[in-house]
Amino acid sequence: MVIHSAVKPYQCAVCGKCLTQKVNLKTHLKIHTGEHPFQRTLCGKNFVQKKSLKVHYVTHYNILTKIVT
């Protein structure tokens, strides 16, 4: 695992973005595939990561609830 280093060995084949961890590359690739599994039902916004949906809840609705997947 490469952390706190300038080395970014994982490169996106679509846009060329380089990342430090393979798991981050897998998450990043969802942007290109259109996979957004976490959806806000009231406003219709979709998110790649669960934590982004949680931030959306707190920022726009001032609530922090348990998100069921």
Image (tube, grey):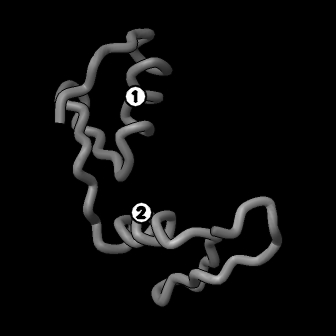
Could you classify mark 1 by the number of other residues whose Cα lies within 10 Å: few (under 14), some (14-19), or many (20 or more)?
Answer: some
Depicted 59 relative to depicted 24: above or below: above
- Classify residue 21 by image quadrant: bottom right
Task: Give the left or right position of residue 46, taking residue 24 as reference.
Answer: left
Disc number for residue 54:
1
Name the residue nearer the viewer: 6 or 13. 6
Residue beneath disc 2: 27
Q: Position of residue 29 (x, y in %)?
A: 40, 72
Name the element at disc 1.
helix
Q: Amino acid at mark 2?
A: Thr
Give the quadrant of the C terminus: top left
Depicted 16 relative to depicted 62: above or below: below
- Classify residue 61 by image quadrant: top left
Q: Position of residue 22 (x, y in %)?
A: 50, 72
Residue depicted at x 41% and y 70%: 26
Residue depicted at x 48% and y 89%: 13
Residue depicted at x 69% and y 69%: 2
Name the residue nearer the viewer: 49 or 41. 49
Of the numbered discs 1 and 2, the one sitting upstream in the chain is 2
Q: Position of residue 40 (x, y in %)?
A: 25, 32
Name the residue nearer the viewer: 48 or 3. 3
Q: Are marks 1 and 2 in contact (CB under 8 Å)?
A: no
Depicted 18 relative to depicted 54: above or below: below
Name the element at disc 2.
helix
